[in-house]
Image (cartoon, rainbow, N blue to C red):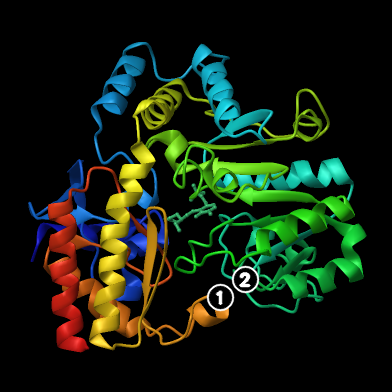
Amino acid sequence: MTRSEMLFERAVKRIPGGVNSPVRAFGSVGEKPRFIVSAEGAYLTDADGRRYLDYVGSWGPMILGHNHPAVREAVLEACSQGLSFGAATEREVEMAELICSLVPSVEMVRMVNSGTEAVMSAIRAARGYTGRDKILKFAGCYHGHCDAMLVKAGSGVMTAGVPDSAGVPAGCTKDTLTAAYNDLPGVEELFAACGSEIAAVIVEPVGANMGVVLPEEGFLEGLRSLCSRYGSVLIFDEVITGFRLGLSGAQGYFGIEADLTTFGKIIGGGMPVGAYGGRREIMELVAPLGPVYQAGTLSGNPVAMAAGLAELRTLRDTPGFYEELHRKSRILFQGLEGLVKKAGKACRFNYIGSLGSLFFTGQEVRDYGSAKTSDTEAYAAYFSHMLDRGIYLAPSQFEAMFVSAALTEEEIGKTLEAAESFLNING
Ligand code: KE4
């Protein structure tokens, strides 16, 4: 029995599913989770001393690679000054100023402790600002686990949202409408019917929680113009894309400004951090300034701020950081795309910047419905094949590959070799 197996045996006795977040249980790939003890650069090391090239990167924060010296030293220095004060600190001011300087649509920002908290708070601010109740989301987009967002995918656009989790009262989802990603006509129809009741549209500007799904030409622009026309708040959930696609995230990449934006992951540099921010007239409604209540014991925690500031400043101050990250990502993604074409296997590869997904389906993947045609058993076989060769991919078809700057072309070549051996065997 491996040490990871022994640890998992203990874990399942005291932690639901043995993990503190479901995807970590490796359930959908039929493997037992590897317990990680350390990470450095592009590599994870598990409890049995096995090293893996990491394409999860803690689900996004590790864009610089693991244990980056600038982040580590900033955290150690902050720790030496005390871990938490429950009081205002300079680092929070610096973080707010930095985010506002990098994302033009963000005039004010509030720190929280997770992406879920950022989304929950942004929705409340949008409802407080508009005095409306309805929220429109898209099937296949994940915005954390606040009740209003746990809505059965694909529930009729016009009908009240049906909870997609036990323990969520129907009342919490009745005002959540769901449309199909990239289906602008469907959204236009919905706005025509009840646009005056819609407080906000929340969208992942690049879908990354159904695998990677790109917005089609005109989709985001259409959401922007509909929200402006009907006085609804456009919320870009940039928990993944924020500072991943570039210093101004997806809004900079696509040239579309959101009214509110949610952040997480990279802004914490690996520590628990989320944030929401946007137009001053909306954010000024947030307590203690206005009537929209939101609070948090550890929000803006000085150690977490130190980690996030070090990461964001490194991204901002490293000349050509994103160009190089995207150059290496293209080598990997175009290499994988070429392999699936050569193997003739029913596969599709979607990618943008340093995010990508291999789908085991012959269909173009443009929304949740098409993503769900993917053969998840084939993905599980691919995952295990790669894991056995020291390549650590997302343990689910419906997640993304996250490329970090620590990856070298040699390691990308090793990844492509491992993928080629799978596709040749299973082509
Ligand atoms: P957290 O509450 O997990 O920090 O963030 C929720 C969230 C919000 N918005 C988007 C676009 C997200 O992707 C997430 C969380 N992402 C997942 C990965 N797909 C986190 C991994 C996990 O759940 O363990």
Q: Is residue 160 visible?
A: yes
Q: Which mark is residue 108?
A: none
Q: Nearer the viewer, residue 291 or 391?
A: 391
**Residue at the spot of label 1:** 368
Decide: is 350 above or below 227: below
Q: Which residue is denoted by mark 2 in the rendering?
A: 139
Residue 285's spot in the image, x, y percent?
A: 81, 31
Q: Position of residue 178 (x, y in %)?
A: 71, 70
> Ligand 1 near label 2 (Cβ, under 8 Å)?
no
Residue 382 image-quadrant placement: bottom left
Locate the N terminus and report the quarter of the image it occupies. Answer: bottom left
- In this rendering, would 276 be left or right of 398? right
Q: CA distance from mark 1 to mark 2?
A: 6 Å
Residue contact at pointers 1 and 2, CB within 8 angstroms: yes
| Amino acid of disc 1 | Tyr
Q: Secondary structure at mark 1?
A: helix
Q: Quadrant of the C terminus?
A: bottom left
Q: Position of residue 277 (x, y in %)?
A: 66, 35
Q: Amino acid at mark 2?
A: Ala
The residue at label 1 has a CB less than 8 Å from ligand 1: no
User: From what the image shows, is residue 427 above or below residue 390?
Assistant: below
Q: Residue at x 69, y 45 (%)?
A: 258
